[in-house]
Image: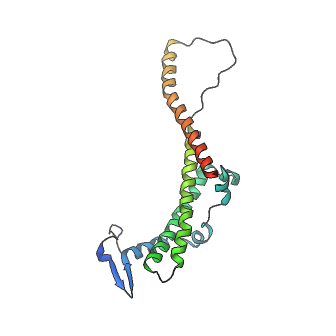
Amino acid sequence: MIPITVSCDDPSNWITKHGYTRNLCLEEKLERDYATLTWKDLNDRVYLPPHWLDQPLGWRFDNKTDQQAINYLEDSYRILKIRVDKWQYAGEYYPRDPSPASHASQWGSELSKIERLMSHIRSIMQAEKIPSPAIPTDDPVEETPPPESIELETESKITTFPLIIAGVIAIIVVILLLKRRRA
């Protein structure tokens, strides 16, 4: 077994055998990665639920929190990335069989969809973490705060204002991304 610290890019790892140029180190790494996948990984997590992409906040229709959706997508990405890497290598270095290259191309596009969706969910999570500005009350009587709290209030306004601006920018970015996706 090749130690993990060895670089598979070393030219000595490449050999030509039976008409194929092969990187034995990389093949072993790909097989080792593939061996970490369970039967369930190979059969259950190979797709992205379509309504997660078709509808804004589609994952919430499955009663998933944003974090649960991110966890599911990260796990799906890890599993699919291992499979795509193996197909990509086979398609490039074993050209007599075109199916691995076809699989790598098809499922590689799924990887980019997963990446975009994870980015979208993270931006929504970030936007929701930003506190909304305080809503003024209808009470006409205002109490004068003691002098110590005036300083704290000023500091609070200074730190809150950039957060509000960041929230507005994040919301605008999310809206633009949704419009672009629909177009």
Could you tell me residue 86's position as x and y percent?
A: 48, 73
Q: Of residues 171 and 33, which is closer to you in this image?
A: 171
Name the residue at the front extreme. Answer: 183
Task: Tell whether 41 sits left or right of 82.
Answer: right
Residue 93 sits in quarter: bottom left
Residue in the image at 54% along x and 51% along y = 119
**Residue 23 in the image: above or below residue 58:** below
Q: Is residue 147 visible?
A: yes
Could you tell me residue 65's position as x and y percent?
A: 63, 49
Residue in the image at 44% along x and 73% along y = 30
Q: Of residues 30 and 94, which is closer to you in this image?
A: 94
Q: Is residue 79 visible?
A: no
Q: Of residues 46 and 182, which is closer to you in this image?
A: 182
Could you tell me residue 50's position as x and y percent?
A: 66, 60
Could you tell me residue 92's position as x and y percent?
A: 44, 75
Residue in the image at 58% along x and 39% along y = 172
Residue 48 sits in quarter: bottom right
